[in-house]
């Protein structure tokens, strides 16, 4: 049997299930006469919760890290809030028992946090519920489960993983986590990743679907759990585990390192994101910035167009997470395969070549104005740069620049802060843009090559069409020449040239990008360290020698073969 969930912490764990149930915290509601004594009982429970939590935070600081310990000290700060405690005491003074007072006030705060719809604030609702459970456990004298006593090779299966549960985990004891709830940015996911324990989250009803001692393979990279695996499956999992661990051990030395070639040229290594919260993972994976924020997800996840304020909050949040590192935000790239009903795009015969991306935005100034104003406002909070998708002519770029300047003037009148020097760049992903790269470079602050689309448009082939998929390859000489041309044009004009398509992380192509003079690589968060490693394996001279050979070849197959032979 195979169960599917959210892949929340990479790696493979093989072990036996321990279903961990939260202690039963049911209690009898009652009224109290001696309200002073009941207030004391609540205060004593809070005190002992604080002592216990601080102890766990200290253990966690040593075993996992400062950032993770802060989740627990955050709980202490929360319950220490005089307003929160005051509200509980008021209820007790009205005759309510301590348990009811605690539950009512914590639930009130949790509901309030949840209602904001903002993901970070909503996380505080989980925190407040953790605090509630913790203090309630003290009032009832039932401490939460401590995983510190589990035997080696345990796979913890639980409803949700709380920081207090994980504080005492011994190295090697827990080899996997499976939970019923929690997403990629939940505390469970953050903790599992920090402890480097494979985790698959959000499998509905898993606590009753698995039983103690069941043998499982937790694949935290694929998001699957194999239950009672066969000998063959186990052997394959062990091989995959060994390969994963060897790769991870090797990549550790690239954490915190500069991105440099073997001959010392330095590059910028950014990550691609789809939502503001993805920036957290990008930073955790040591990206030096964000090279592509695909904003269409904000629009796709909403039933109506996100307002200027909603977009502003999203861009600002990403900017704050990036802490003044560059954050390149691509303006709305809808159309083609990305349909958004409320934006009123009509069906077209050939949507990829149709009314989409910048073409749509320039025709729908109401939609674009909202986004550009939100971006400008957010630019006061970080190093935001604007990137325009699917450009095919200079006028499109000059039109965007004119709009941005108009909105800056609006803000000057309104007294709203923004970065007046915000950079505006072009996503180089059409053959037309490549051919006029020198002209665009005079107007653009930077280029970023979108190899996913540039490959399709250059080869004139639709990725979704099986019959022509064989043509869809960045190894084609036409695509490689186009990329080289864009990089050279950008470099001669003195602007930064990056790449944010999938090809930026292709280890076989990296020496070509070094040879062509690419400055910035933007890759998925999980590819940051491996890209840094592959860049470090080539000197500029070796890369140029290889490029010289490759650029004389006539077919994609020959290019592939030569790059494959030379791969490191
Ligand atoms: C690209 O086209 O290379 C790119 C990065 O953008 P998307 O995949 O979103 O079109
Ligand atoms: Mg594209």
Image: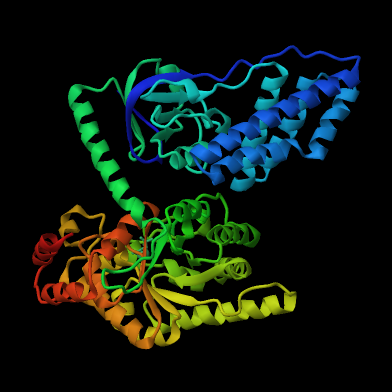
Residue 331 % position (x, y):
49, 67
Residue 69 % position (x, y):
57, 40
In the rendered image, the vertical position of residue 359 relative to residue 99, given as above or below: below
In the rendered image, the vertical position of residue 454 relative to residue 445, given as above or below: above
Picture quarter with the N terminus: top left
Residue at position x 19%, y 29% in the image: 235
Which quarter holds ligand 2?
bottom left
Is 555 in front, or is 78?
78
In the rendered image, the vertical position of residue 517 relative to residue 353, given as above or below: below
Is 425 in front, or is 431?
425
Q: Relative to 186, is 266 on the left or the right? A: left
Residue 2 % position (x, y):
31, 26
- Asked if one can make out residue 341 in the rendered structure from this viewpoint, the answer is no
**Image quadrant of residue 60?**
top right
**Image quadrant of residue 264?**
bottom left
Colour mapping: rainbow
Residue at position x 70%, y 79% in the image: 412
């Amino acid at each position: 049997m195979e169960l599917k969930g959210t892949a929340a912490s990479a790696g493979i764990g093989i072990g036996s299930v321990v279903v961990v149930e939260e202690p039963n915290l049911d209690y009898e509601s009652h009224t109290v006469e001696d309200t002073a004594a009941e207030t004391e009982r609540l205060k004593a429970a809070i005190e002992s919760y604080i002592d216990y939590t601080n102890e766990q935070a200290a253990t966690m600081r040593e075993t996992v890290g400062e950032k993770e310990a802060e989740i627990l000290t955050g709980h202490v700060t929360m319950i220490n809030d005089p307003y929160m405690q005051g509200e509980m005491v008021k209820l007790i003074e009205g005759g309510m028992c301590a348990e009811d007072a605690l539950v009512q006030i914590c639930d009130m705060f949790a509901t309030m946090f949840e209602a904001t719809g903002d993901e970070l604030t909503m996380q505080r609702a989980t925190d407040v519920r953790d605090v509630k459970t913790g203090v309630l456990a003290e009032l009832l004298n039932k401490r939460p489960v401590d995983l510190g006593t589990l035997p080696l090779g345990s796979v913890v299966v639980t409803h949700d993983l709380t920081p207090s549960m994980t504080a005492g985990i011994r190295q090697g004891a827990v080899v996997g986590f499976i939970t019923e709830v929690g997403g990629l940015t939940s505390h469970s996911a953050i903790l599992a990743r920090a402890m480097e324990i494979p985790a698959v989250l959000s499998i509905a009803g898993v606590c009753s679907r698995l039983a103690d001692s069941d043998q499982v393979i937790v694949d935290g990279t694929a998001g699957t759990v194999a239950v009672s695996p066969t000998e063959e499956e186990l052997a394959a999992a062990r091989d995959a585990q060994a390969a994963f661990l060897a790769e991870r051990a090797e990549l550790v030395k690239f954490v915190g390192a500069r991105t440099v070639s073997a001959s010392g040229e330095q590059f910028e290594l950014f990550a691609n994101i789809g939502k503001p919260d993805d920036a957290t993972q990008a930073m955790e994976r040591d990206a030096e910035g964000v090279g592509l924020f695909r904003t269409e997800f904000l629009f796709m996840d909403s039933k109506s167009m996100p307002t200027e304020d909603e977009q502003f909050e999203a861009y600002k949040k990403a900017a704050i997470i990036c802490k003044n590192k560059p954050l390149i935000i691509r303006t709305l790239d809808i159309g083609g395969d990305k349909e958004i009903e409320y934006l009123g795009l009509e069906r077209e015969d050939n949507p990829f070549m149709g009314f989409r991306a910048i073409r749509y935005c320039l025709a729908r100034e109401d939609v674009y104005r909202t986004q550009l104003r939100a971006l400008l406002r957010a630019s006061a909070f970080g190093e935001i740069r604007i990137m325009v998708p699917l450009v095919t002519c200079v006028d499109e770029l000059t039109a965007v620049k004119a709009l941005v300047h108009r909105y800056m003037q609006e803000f000057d009148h309104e007294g709203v802060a923004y970065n007046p020097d915000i950079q505006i760049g072009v996503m180089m992903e059409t053959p037309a843009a490549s051919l006029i790269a020198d002209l665009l470079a005079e107007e653009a602050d930077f280029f970023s090559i979108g190899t996913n689309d540039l490959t399709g448009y250059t080869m004139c082939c639709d990725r979704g069409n099986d019959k022509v998929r064989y043509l869809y390859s960045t190894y084609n000489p036409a695509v490689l020449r186009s990329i080289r041309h864009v990089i050279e044009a950008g470099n001669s004009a003195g602007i930064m040239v990056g790449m944010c398509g999938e090809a930026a992380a292709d280890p076989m192509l990296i020496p070509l990008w070094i040879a062509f003079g690419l400055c910035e690589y933007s890759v998925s968060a999980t590819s940051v360290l491996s890209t840094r490693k592959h860049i470090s394996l080539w000197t500029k001279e070796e890369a140029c020698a290889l490029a010289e050979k490759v650029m004389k070849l006539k077919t994609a197959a020959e290019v592939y073969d030569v790059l494959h032979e030379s791969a490191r």
